[in-house]
Amino acid sequence: MPLFKGCDRLLLDEVLGKSSSRFASYRKGDFIAMQNSVCRSLYLLCEGSVYAQMISEEGREFTLDTLSAPDVLASAFLFGTENVLPVTIVANSDCELWIVSKESIQLLIEQDKAVLRNFLAVLSDHSLFLSRKLEQFALQTLSSRLLGFLEKDGAIQNLQETAFILGVTRPSLSRVISQLVRQGMIRKTEAGYVLA
């Protein structure tokens, strides 16, 4: 687990042995945490993957990110003055989570500099990711977002799923794909749509 890399194992065992931490198993599609719920614990993803999703009052859904084990979830909201989750966390596959209380994490951060450094690195990495995501949606066109998606993921195999990830409707995505195919920027293969 990245959060505990290089930490004092004896301290970790002592603090977590006395804490109210617990392991939880989730099946694909299960809700792990709901948007607007109070964040009282840190979620440590030990196995599997999850996705973070925002849902508007009108019911529009936007997938912010997909995270795979090992990773730390909800780190940016645990110690906030308004510690409310802005996303719903859903199991993307069967997964195992280690749910650790805020008090235990705080004690570890106070007593072990490695945990403090790791926690700050996790926060910084997640902040950088969110900044890039905001830039992507605020400043880029759907065409450039789609091309960036293809550079990162290699191929589009499922239009509905990709539209969901990009936060657009399937017809909008289909129009942009057709336009990019005509321009020769992407092509259709057996693996799906790929960069030309």
Image (cartoon, helix red, strand yellow):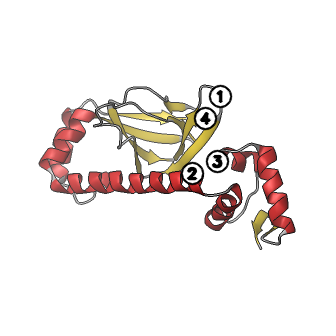
User: Marks 4 and 2, how far apart in space?
Assistant: 29 Å
Name the residue tied to disc 3. Answer: 165
Classify 45 as above or below 144: above
User: Marks 1 and 3, how far apart in space?
Assistant: 15 Å
Name the residue tied to disc 1. Answer: 59
Q: Are marks 3 and 2 in contact (CB under 8 Å)?
A: no
Q: Quadrant of residue 178?
A: bottom right
User: Marks 1 and 4, how far apart in space?
Assistant: 18 Å
Q: Secondary structure at mark 3?
A: helix
Of the two numbered discs 1 and 4 on the same chain, state the one appearing first in sequence: 4
Q: Secondary structure at mark 1?
A: loop
Which disc is residue 135 wearing? none
Q: Position of residue 75 (x, y in %)?
A: 35, 43
Asked whether, in this view, residue 13 is left or right of residue 63, the answer is left
Q: Are marks 1 and 3 in contact (CB under 8 Å)?
A: no
Which label sits in the foreground, 3 or 2?
2
Which disc is residue 29 wearing? 4
Q: Which amino acid is tagged 3?
A: Ile
Which disc is residue 138 wearing? 2
Q: Which amino acid is tagged 4?
A: Gly
Which label sits in the foreground, 2 or 1?
2
